[in-house]
Image: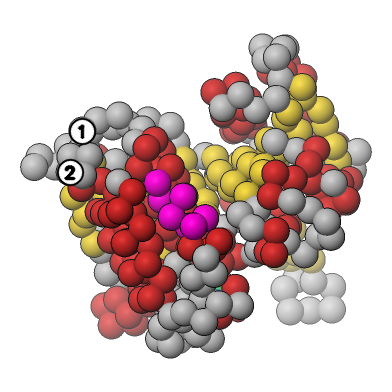
Amino acid sequence: MSNKPLRAGGSHARIAVIPGDGIGKEVTPVAVNIIKAATAKHHRPMEFVEFDWGADKFLTEHISLPDGAVEMLRDEFDAILFGALGDPRVPSNQHAADILLGLRFKLDLFVNVRPTELFHERFTPLKDRVCNDIRLIVFRENTEGIYVGAGGFFKKGTADEVATQEDINSRKGVERTIRYAFDYARAHKLHRLCMSDKSNAMIFAGDLWQRVFKSLRTEYPEIESRHLYIDTLAMELVRDPRQFDVIVTNNLFGDIISDLAAELAGGLGLAPSGNIHPGQTSLFEPVHGSAPNIAGKGIANPFGSVLAAGMMLEFLGWHDEAHLLKQSVKAALHDNVTTPDLHGSKVTLEVAEWLAHYVSKHA
Ligand SMILES: NC(=O)c1ccc[n+]([C@@H]2O[C@H](COP(=O)([O-])OP(=O)(O)OC[C@H]3O[C@@H](n4cnc5c(N)ncnc54)[C@H](O)[C@@H]3O)[C@@H](O)[C@H]2O)c1
């Protein structure tokens, strides 16, 4: 097989697998096996190449993201399946920042896609909600905002210390993120889009988001679009999540609001995400971290990783296989084949076997 990737819709794909640290190493192989089971019968050859980037390599070889890694991933792979990074032996989290933020920024993965869907009523902390009440998707600007690291200290360590943290918003960055959300809504026949900011208090960045939103919405007249301040959005999401199909917002607000949304549908263990640049190598990962408190115990919940793998297949244009992965998770949850974090009694390997069997049977 050649080293050149075939982009979305092609007949085979090259996937870079980065399990990372802690439970990332436990859940990622589960996702890879299920992809293999789902794609085998459809004659969709996939090549998986695993990379050992993470805390162990950082501690022994002082390498986080190796030289040339970004170019290699960009030129030779269709997508990246990522686990999690974070290890108590690296208190600075330097390797995680280098690898994960490095890939997001250097591959220009400008939109973070976080779907939330209630798969079973018992997973929501909200009263009297049924599955159809919670089905929404958050699009978060992923390469700008307050996370770019612009700022500094003045008189650090003194009583007069000052720290600044700047919120960077480019017109290009805002526009491509909002447009991506509108395009997604149109393609998936989702009728409601909410843009959220804090333009009443953050007046410069907010003004830019407002102007871009108002200009773009005219191109999508069939979509009912509205604006909510981020604090109001947080309240409304809890009060009545049925109002929302698509939410688009900046990096910081998207980080927070997508965690809130995830919690409405069962929490971290069930939340997948995609870091996407359309048409280019993109990265898919569960939302959770490396969970050092349970790493090595064999009880990590693999659903977030399997759902992230499903998003990756969708990105590759392999819709049937993507659907099958999601169905397998739904079926497992329905039959209570779950790990202890979801009040189940199974270990990771038992859930993995069950999912693989389901997928092979229904492929
Ligand atoms: N994308 C990433 O790689 C990412 C994201 C978040 C945190 N982190 C890192 O992970 C490390 C731990 O962070 P944290 O404890 O704040 O967050 P975490 O997501 O790792 O864990 C939070 C809690 O949820 C539980 N949990 C998480 N995922 C689970 C799963 N799949 N199955 C069962 N239980 C699960 C954990 O046991 C823990 O109690 C830190 O180093 C942090 O920086 C990495």
Count of marks placed on residues = 2
| Pointer 2 residue | 45
Span highlighted in magenta in the image = 324-331
Residue at the extreme left: 1
- Out of 313 and 168, give the one closest to the viewer: 313
Q: Quadrant of residue 265?
A: bottom right
Direction from residue 86 to residue 116 in the image, left or right: right
Q: Which mark is residue 292?
A: none
Position of residue 12 measured from the top left corner of the image (x, y, whole percent): 20, 38
The N terminus - image quarter: top left
Mark 2 and mark 1: span between their CA atoms? 7 Å
- Quadrant of the rendered image holding ligand 1: bottom right
Q: Which mark is residue 11?
A: 1
Report the amino acid beneath label 1.
Ser
Q: Quadrant of residue 21?
A: bottom left
- Out of 321 and 359, give the one closest to the viewer: 359
Q: Residue at x 56, y 27 (%)?
A: 188
Q: Residue at x 65, y 53 (%)?
A: 118
Direction from residue 116 to residue 278 in the image, left or right: left
- Out of 11 and 73, give the one closest to the viewer: 11
Placement of 262 over or under 132, stated as above or below:
below
Position of residue 231 measured from the top left corner of the image (x, y, whole percent): 87, 49
Position of residue 155 measured from the top left corner of the image (x, y, whole percent): 75, 71
Pointers 2 and 1 in contact (C-beta within 8 Å): yes
Report the amino acid beneath label 2.
Pro
Is disc 2 surrounded by few (<14), some (14 to 19) or many (20+) residues within 10 Å? some
Position of residue 219 measured from the top left corner of the image (x, y, whole percent): 66, 12
Can residue 309 be seen at all in this image of the molecule? yes
At mark 1, the secondary structure is loop
Judge whether residue 221 is colored magenta.
Answer: no
At mark 2, the secondary structure is loop
